[in-house]
Amino acid sequence: MKQENNSVVTEFIFIGFSNFPDLQVPLFVVFTVMYLAIWVGNVIIVTTIRRESSLHIPMYFFLAVLSSSEICYTLMIIPNMLANLLRKKASISFTGCATQMYMFLAFGDTNCLLLTMMGYDRYVSICKPLHYPILMNQRFCTKLVVFSVASGFLLSAPQTYFIFSLPFCGPNKIHHFFCDLAPLLQLACDRNYIGEIVLFVISILVVFCSFLLILLSYLLILSAILKIPTTDGKHKAFSTCASHLIVVVVHFGCASIIYLRPQSRYTLNADIFISVSYTLVTPLLNPVVYTLRNKDVKIALRKSLGRRKFSWKI
């Protein structure tokens, strides 16, 4: 990104958690534990799905890709945030800030689209079970994943461009712990109303439309479940969706609060802690929910651990 016209800012300073000086060390400890748990949990999910042939079905294929994306997503934000909690001056270069925003938005958009694909997978599985193997074949699922990743990285490009094409002539203090849209817009010396409209439209396209498609999928799923004659059948059908539904509610709930509202309603402390929820809590929730609530994954984990213990004894 080139700095435009009057821009004299060469670096940005994060103020984020400096408003809570007594909490910085405790937060560092808590966030480090959570970050390690995210890595361990998601790596276990990806490894287990890859090793266990019983999990080689579309639902777990999407889950493995989502877990991989969550690892990359947190990698863009958390290590830098942890280092800044221990620094006197938490700074990032102009180019580094642009790169961080682009990669964060790219993986964030990808996650929204992947959750949408997972919702479609659940719809086909429950509403069209006889056609499921044909409709959700490996080639089609791969195309859905490629579409999600490519769209995520393409859509984040104009968002990042419009932010960093604005003139930044000071101050350079970001009231956040990473380079996000709203706090950077507040630092710009001039407004680009067309750019802000484009940013809002892309946010609507990714967040709202994705959630709307998921909601539509679950309305059709609910209609199909209500037609199942037995209680056990209804419970079994719903249980296959429960984990995905929990992650969707948390992920899109936080994203909607941050990105689908007027910039004038930006509030520092509240937004910081909401951002913590979707940069740390949601990626942590993914492996926890899918391992504790998913019978197939738990069985596969026991098998994998059992084989490993056996190999150690030998």
Image: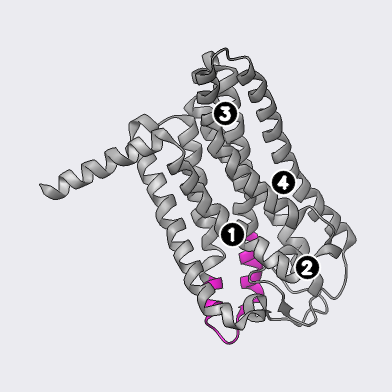
What's the residue at 64%, 18% (across, down)?
A: 226
Spatial separation of the CA atoms under disc 2 and disc 1: 18 Å
Identified by mark 3, the residue type is Arg
User: What residue is pinned by disc 2?
Assistant: 267
Q: Among all residues in the image, which is located at the extreme front?
A: 231
Q: Earlier in the sequence, mark 4 or mark 2?
A: 4
Spatial separation of the CA atoms under disc 3 and disc 2: 37 Å
Of residues 211 and 111, the one nearer the viewer is: 211
Q: Does the magenta stretch include residue 224?
A: no
Residue 143 pos. (x, y %): 56, 34
- Of the residues tagged 2 and 1, which is closer to the observer? 2
User: What residue is pinned by disc 1?
Assistant: 279
- Of the residues tagged 4 and 2, which is closer to the observer? 2
Rendered position, 128 above or below 18: above
Check if mark 4's residue and mark 2's residue have beta carbons within 8 Å: no
For the record, the magenta segment spans: 80-102
User: Dot 1, crowdedness within 10 Å: few (<14), some or many (≥20)?
Assistant: many
Q: Quadrant of the N terminus?
A: bottom right
- Of the residues tagged 3 and 2, which is closer to the observer? 2
Rendered position, 260 above or below 167: above
Q: Earlier in the sequence, mark 1 or mark 3?
A: 3
> What number is the disc on residue 207?
4
Q: Quadrant of residue 156?
A: bottom right
User: Dot 4, crowdedness within 10 Å: few (<14), some or many (≥20)?
Assistant: many
Check if mark 4's residue and mark 1's residue have beta carbons within 8 Å: no
User: What residue is pinned by disc 3?
Assistant: 122
